[in-house]
Amino acid sequence: KHCDEAMEKVKLASNEMDQAAIAATAGQLKPLEATDLQGYQTQLNTATIEIKDLIEPLADAAKSHPEKLGHNVITMSLYFEPLSKATIGAASKLPDMTRQHDLFSQARTL
């Protein structure tokens, strides 16, 4: 159950990013006003670090502590929405579509 919930959260965040990437490709990604590029980059960096820091505990739970797996998966999934929103926000502040595309591509690798 926990893994299903986590997958749904990741899927929603991914779909949101995909829609923004399509808008960027069409030249229709409107600049978001919540913060500036540096603010979005900080949010992106924070979410990325949190996800990176959770990889080892998640792998350990998968190998040796199955009782912790659901909790670790849910915890990691919580960072994908902020990652998606920060990626979209940062891309919306970038001056050209090539840089926007590159940012979306990099974020999808997570």
Image: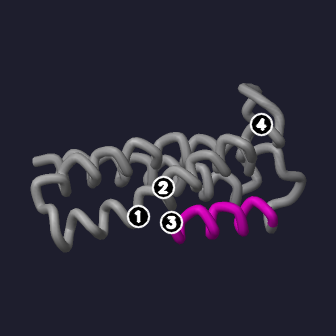
Q: Secondary structure at mark 1?
A: helix
Give the Cα distance between marks 2 and 1: 7 Å
Q: Nearer the viewer, mark 4 or mark 1?
A: 1
What residue type is disc 2 on?
Answer: Ile
Q: Is residue 84 magenta?
A: no
Answer whether labels 2 and 3 touch (C-beta < 8 Å). yes
Give the Cα distance between marks 2 and 3: 9 Å
Q: Residue furthest top?
A: 34
What residue type is disc 1 on?
Answer: Ile
The disc placed on residue 39 is 4
Residue where numbered disc 3 is placed? 110
Q: Residue at x 35, y 53 (%)?
A: 11
Say which label, 1 or 3, has the lower sequence index: 1
Q: Is residue 103 magenta?
A: yes
Say which label, 4 or 1, has the lower sequence index: 4
Residue 108 at x, y = what percent? 53, 66
